[in-house]
């Protein structure tokens, strides 16, 4: 999960640069298209993956993942990042709470939530539209975990990822109009396309591929708690790479997340 989080935040750097040229929904769509192209080139899914139940499951997973990416990008365009992250984390919280069976599970979840809030540096500010987009991202994130577990248990998760992201790119293709509407004559086309592929690779292909490995080994409720490690990864990258000092609340939050992960049992 830490490796996947590191890759995701490397991809986020490409996304931030693309915001200078493309609207947030357009950047998210480029991310999905980039991931679809890379998965198709690597996996080359069998014909059976494009029909029947396999197509329905993969398509639903890819579509909800694409909508999650788009909703989150639209939310951070209107809200402080920490606020958007904290609201979006409501999705994993619901999944983890639904799968909690003991008081130990509940305590682990509460400690994880407290840790995320401390690390994310939440500010109660922003537009109602931003909050709505963040809540939509939370709902999609919950769906991503539930459907992701089913994809991980499928005969060929790699086929499902390739087909899913392709379907997701097609279903959300209307958002390509936001890309076209924000396009300027001096926009460096090659740079945008290369960064779009890089964004798909680092923000989707690598972390979501790692998610599938984890989901095959653990239950979705434990996986939801593990997602609290993503803000930890962000804080550690800022400390190691950007030489940003960690505040006392961030250090307490990191410790809280570590305790939560240790408390929660990794049931399959």
Image (cartoon, grey):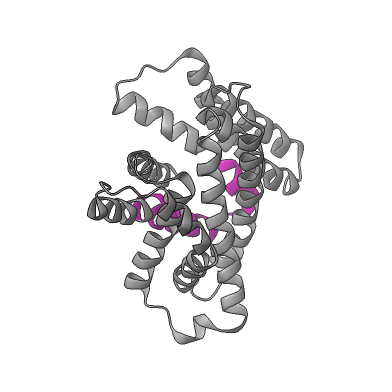
Give the image location of residue 134, x and y in percent. Answer: 61, 40
Viewed as shown, does residue 74 lie left or right of 203?
right
Viewed as shown, does residue 223 lie left or right of 187?
right
User: Is there any visible trace of residue 14 in the rendered image?
Assistant: yes
Give the image location of residue 57, x and y in percent. Answer: 60, 71
Viewed as shown, does residue 173 lie left or right of 206?
right
232 relative to 169, above or below: above
254 relative to 90, above or below: above
Task: Specify the segment rendered in magenta.
Answer: 201-227
* Identity of the residue furthest to the top in this view: 248
At a point 34% along the width and 42% down the height, the residue shown is: 10
102 relative to 209, above or below: above
Observer-nearest of 33 and 147: 33
At a point 51% along the width and 36% down the height, the residue shown is: 76
Residue 206 is covered by the magenta coloring: yes
Give the image location of residue 260, x and y in percent. Answer: 60, 33
User: Is there any visible trace of residue 268 in the rendered image?
Assistant: no
* Identity of the residue furthest to the front in this view: 185
Is the stretch drawn in magenta largely helix, strand or loop? helix
Q: Quadrant of residue 55?
A: bottom right
At a point 68% along the width and 31% down the height, the residue shown is: 110
């Amino acid at each position: 999960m830490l490796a996947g989080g590191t890759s995701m935040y490397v991809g986020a750097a490409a996304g931030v640069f693309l915001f200078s040229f493309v609207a947030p929904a357009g950047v998210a769509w480029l991310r999905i298209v980039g991931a679809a192209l890379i998965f198709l080139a690597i996996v080359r899914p069998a014909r059976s993956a494009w029909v029947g139940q396999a197509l329905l499951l993969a398509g639903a997973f890819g579509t909800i993942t694409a909508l999650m990416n788009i909703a989150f990008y639209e939310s951070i365009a209107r809200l402080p990042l920490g606020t958007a992250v904290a609201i979006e984390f409501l999705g994993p919280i619901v999944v983890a709470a639904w799968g909690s069976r003991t008081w130990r599970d509940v305590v682990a979840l509460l400690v994880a939530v407290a840790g995320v809030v401390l690390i994310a540096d939440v500010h109660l500010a922003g537009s109602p539209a931003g909050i709505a987009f963040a809540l939509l991202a939370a709902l999609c994130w919950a769906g991503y975990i539930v459907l992701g577990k089913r994809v991980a248990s499928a005969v060929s998760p790699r086929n499902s990822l390739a087909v899913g992201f392709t379907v997701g790119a097609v279903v959300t293709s209307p958002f390509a109009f936001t890309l076209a509407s924000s396009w300027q004559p001096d926009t460096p086309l090659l740079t945008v396309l290369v960064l779009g592929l890089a964004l798909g690779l680092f923000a989707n292909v690598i972390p979501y591929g790692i998610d599938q490995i984890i989901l095959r080994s653990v239950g979705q409720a434990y996986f939801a708690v593990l997602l609290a490690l993503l803000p930890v990864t962000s804080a550690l990258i800022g400390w190691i790479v950007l030489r940003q000092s960690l505040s006392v609340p961030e250090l307490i939050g990191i410790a809280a997340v570590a305790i939560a992960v240790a408390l929660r049992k990794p049931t399959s």
